[in-house]
Image: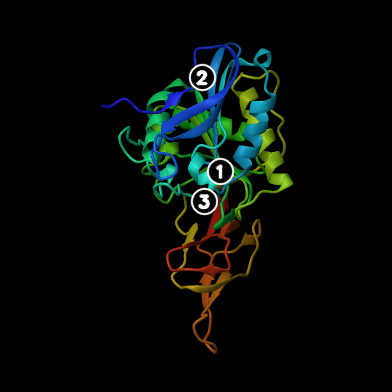
Amino acid sequence: MRTNPIVSTIDFKDSGVHHGHLKLPYSHDGSAWGAVMIPITMIAGRPGPTALLTGANHGDEYEGPVALLELARTLKAEDVSGRVIIVPMMNYPAFLAAKRTSPIDCGNMNRVFPGSPDGTPTAKIADYFQRTLLPMADIVLDIHAGGKTLDFVPFAAAHALADSEQEARCVAAMRAFNAPYSMILSELDSVGMYDTAAEDMGKVFVTTELGGGGSLTAASAAIAKKGVANLLKHAGILEGQPEIGASVDLDTGADGCFTISTSEGLLEMLVDLGDTVEKGQPIARIHDVKRSGTEPTLFHAGVFGILAGRYFPGLIGIGDCLAVIAVVA
């Protein structure tokens, strides 16, 4: 297979604190021999495990970049047992454009793994993670939020895995992150996800959804910062014990947890995030905006649980994920 064209300006074998870039050649109208320069930091201290920390896998999700830029600026090599590799803005073109996907090639970073060294820019970034960064890592954290189209109660998540021992290690790391909610997450489609790539390599993998709406709050940023520190302590990379508070255990593995819109129009939520709902309870209605005098389409909860996620914009289309109701485990 062809060598990936991305070059790191830092040497991953070095010790100490190193700030640099992943240089991805990209020829375009504004720069014939240009490059996408993706910021990266590595902090290496005493011998120990390697953590790979990423944010902005989707470019309109900001808790990860805020927490990881601060960590890159403040973490000292003498405090580290092992190595911390930080990519605060994984899909950097998408982040700069404040979009979920890359403006260069419309690439969704979390649907393109394992990527390709001779594919689109997004595929090349994925391939570099697949073949260079992920193999170095023992524990992987990818910080997500809902972006512009979704909003969530703040949760850390692990997936149900075929390897029960690996799943247990992922769940332990998820609990150590200690978001207000801890989710065993069932994906609608896990093909091409960074999560799947890491888990298929046997890595300890934790992800999150820490809010949404295409912005962040003081509370969601604080959850991310605390969670990153907790995870590094859990891994033995930082000294001390994780700061553990109360967390509600959730699961989305039951039939009926995901409500997909079968109508289009103006979305009116009838319950709010975190509310408990009964199976069959009305949770939303969609108003026809093409004519007046018509009855709205009513949507009901498919399971008993809490509203863990919802579509964020006011106008919704057919096929959009209207709601996620998680079962309290």
Where does residue 250 sit, x and y in percent of width and height? 57, 47
* The one of 7 and 112 positioned closer to us in this rendering: 7
Q: Amino acid at mark 1?
A: His
- Residue at the spot of label 1: 144
Q: Are marks 1 and 3 in contact (CB under 8 Å)?
A: no
195 shown above or below 210: above
Q: Marks 3/2: CA distance? A: 28 Å
Distance between mark 2 and mark 1 Cα atoms: 26 Å
Which image quarter is the N terminus in?
Answer: top left
Instruction: Give residue 309's mark.
Output: none
- Tell which residue pokes out farthest to the bottom in this image: 293
Question: Taking the image as drawn, is residue 162 in sight?
Answer: no
Is residue 256 positioned above or below 54 on the image?
below
Mark 2 residue type: Ile
Name the residue tied to disc 2: 10
Q: Residue at x 68, y 45 (%)?
A: 220
Q: Residues under labels 1 and 3: Cα distance?
A: 13 Å
Say what amino acid the circle numbered 3 marks: Lys
Secondary structure beneath label 2? loop
- In the picture provided, is 269 more to the left or to the right than 263? right
Of pointers 3 and 2, the one earlier in the residue sequence: 2
Above or below for 122 versus 23: below
Which image quadrant is residue 173 in?
A: top right
Specify the farthest residue to the top. 46
Q: Residues within 10 Å of mark 1 (few under 14, many from 20)?
A: many
Which of the marked residues, 2 or 1, is nearer the chain's N terminus?
2
The residue to which callout 3 is attached is 99
In front: label 1 or label 3: 3
Cβ–Cβ below 8 Å for labels 2 and 1?
no
